Image (cartoon, rainbow, N blue to C red):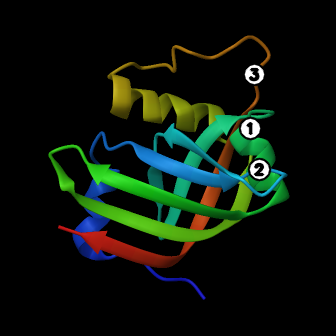
Amino acid sequence: MSQAIPDKYRDLFTKRAFASLGTMMPDGTPQVTPVWVDLDGDLVVVNTARGRQKDRNMRRDPHVALAIIDPENPYRYLELRGRVAEISEDGADAHIDKMAKKYLGADKYPYRQSGEVRVMFKIRPERTSTMG
């Protein structure tokens, strides 16, 4: 069962708000990474490179958690738990450039590695909690 992101917190996805993405390692321990986030309707979009730890973790176990903190008020945040609903390489290069514009003011993602394959993970929220 999915839970929509409350309208009052959708603005966090238009700001330069970083999220902390929690995934599960193969041994069951948590792994947390700061990530850029975007919205596609009610799905949260995270972009990474194929082969990175979060990529491997989300492919193996689609359960994730995200905490997005308002950069203007650190006491205002959205926490969500959900599942990866879609994994796609199609459009992922253009998407990371879009995220570079939002977060860095750059037209192109400047940290691309030679041979890197970008991947978008679309996450369906199942539970949300908020503060502020």
Report how far apart the C-alphas of labels 1 and 3 lie in the structure: 14 Å
Residue under label 1:
53
> Amino acid under label 2?
Met
Residue under label 2:
25
Quarter of the N terminus within the rendering: bottom right
For the residue labelled by badge 2, is the local secondary structure a helix, a strand or a loop?
loop
Front of the two marks 3 and 2:
2
For the residue labelled by badge 1, is the local secondary structure a helix, a strand or a loop?
helix
Please name the residue shown 50% across and 28% down the image.
97
Please name the residue shown 38% across and 42% down the image.
18
Q: Residues within 10 Å of mark 1 (few under 14, many from 20)?
A: some
> Amino acid under label 3?
Glu
**In terms of depth relative to the viewer, which is nearer, 108 or 122?**
122
On screen, residue 85 versus residue 126, left or right, reads: right
Q: Residues within 10 Å of mark 2 (few under 14, many from 20)?
A: some
Front of the two marks 1 and 3:
1
Asked if the residues shown at circle 2 and circle 1 are in contact, with their CB atoms under 8 angstroms apart, the answer is yes
6 w.r.t. 64: above or below: below
Residue 75 picture location, percent across and down: 19, 57
On screen, residue 69 versus residue 45, left or right, reads: left
Report how far apart the C-alphas of labels 3 and 2 lie in the structure: 22 Å
Label whose residue precedes the other's in the sequence (1 or 3):
1
Report how far apart the C-alphas of labels 2 and 1 lie in the structure: 8 Å
Quadrant of the image occupied by residue 114: top right
Q: Residues within 10 Å of mark 3 (few under 14, many from 20)?
A: few
Residue under label 3:
116
Asked if the residues shown at circle 1 and circle 3 are in contact, with their CB atoms under 8 angstroms apart, the answer is no
Please name the residue shown 62% across and 62% down the image.
64
Residue 90 visible in the shown view: no
Count of residue discs: 3
